[in-house]
Image (spheres, rainbow, N blue to C red):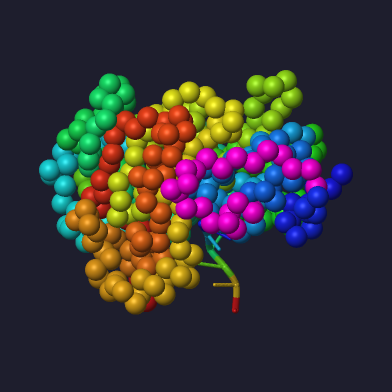
Amino acid sequence: MRTDASTETLPSSAPRAPVRVIASSQSWVEGEAVRQLEAMARLPGMKLAVGLPDLHPGKGAPVGAAFTSEGFLYPYLVGSDIGCGMGLWNVDLLARKARPERWAGKLDLEGPWTGDTEGFLQEHGVKSSGYEAALGTVGGGNHFAELQRVDAVHDSKVFSALGLEADRLLLLVHSGSRGLGEAILRAHVDRHAAGGLADDSPDARTYLTRHDHAVEWGRANRALVARRMLDGIGAMGQRVLDVCHNSVTPRRDTGRTQWLHRKGAAPSDEGPVVIPGSRGALSYLVIPTGESHTSAHSLAHGAGRKWTRTAARERMRERFTAESLTRTSFKSHVVCENKDLLFEEAPPAYKPIDRVVTDLVEAGLVRVVATLAPVLTYKTRARSE
DNA sequence: ATGTTC
């Protein structure tokens, strides 16, 4: 049986698992993303391929998707940022005491943390990895650490049960396992290219052990990013939630083990999650409303890209100065001293988050608990023209 | 996504 996951070599006549795209007609989903989803549905052992409303094309495999398989698992579907996810912290500071401009001038999370990373990992029950120089750093791409205020509370019962208060700041951290996850995928690709692994093979066990470690390390990384941010503004915080959106996990609801791959897909079976928009948009704190096998136990993980990075750079450079993009329509501040990244990550490069969340609500998958508005978004202090 | 990549 072939285990080759490359889309070119899989004949379109190969048997195809059911494909479901959870998006209303008002959500624009690129045809290429759906084609990628359908190609992945032809992989050996695939049982279900689900596109969430933030589905968009990726490098071979689409992003904003979840896949269940039997007998085989596919590291390539998880991608290189194993363990990437969102953590939310409750900050012991009133929103009206926020000083975004002052904080933007001094916050610096570049470079290794000067504290005891080994000790920090130990406290979190995580083994060190050799990548500790990156522990507590945000990374690139769409990663960020963002101070937020509460825009509106829609479900005060759940909101209070989470220990949240409407007048307090929150901190949302989106980051992953940095170079660690990348090295794990590279080791797999060196041996198997885009092919999958028989789930009873030694290579599958090796990959899963490393994968699980990267997931834990990624979680600890977000915790250290949060601590560095909070240290920088002189505040303390408490973790409210932390969910991973790039991972593969076993499920045993059907008798035979199924492998649930999430590629930019938040879990719907681990309690509340935050679905962030672009840095110039609201983030949605939502609670899943019932377990759903047909949605592969998954939710959208963000707004989803509308423009490629290249297109965003070109279009945004024509229309805006870098300086103007360091503030948003919410009057929030953006620390991003890499100009290319500032343009690539500009709000118009992303789809409207309200439509993504509305699609999830209308599909019966979530209820909105609160909306959160940006106050200060930290991307990078590393200067680059 | 990536102690990237020439």
Name which residue lies at 76% across and 38% down: A45
For the C terminus of chain A, which image quadrant? Answer: bottom left
Q: Is residue A219 above or below residue A184?
A: above
State left or right for residue A270 relative to residue A156: right
- Do we see residue A68 in this rendering? yes
What are the residue bounds of the magenta stretch? A14-36
Q: Please provide percent x and percent y for residue A16.
A: 74, 43
> Image quadrant of residue A287?
top left
Farthest residue to the front: give it.
A25
Tell me the residue at 56%/33% (across/down): A295
Task: Choose between A234 and A222: the one closer to the eye.
Answer: A222
Residue at the far left in the pictured view = A96
Q: Residue A310: x, y in percent?
A: 48, 70
Residue A165, located in which quarter of the rendered image? top left
Q: Main secondary structure of the magenta part?
A: loop
Percent across and percent down for residue A280 are 29, 55
Q: Let me know if residue A245 appears in the view.
A: no
Q: Residue at x 31, y 74 (%)?
A: A319
Q: How many marks?
A: 0
Indicate left or right for A97 with A240 as reference.
left
User: Closer to the camera, A192 or A154?
Assistant: A154
Q: Where is A56 relative to A96, above or below? A: below
Residue A212 lies in the magenta stretch? no
Q: Nearer the viewer, residue A156 or A124?
A: A156
Q: Quadrant of the N terminus of chain A?
A: top right
Q: Position of residue A47 (x, y in %)?
A: 71, 35
Q: Could you tell me which residue is drawn at 54 percent across and 56 percent down?
A: A30
Q: Is residue A285 left or right of residue A257?
A: left
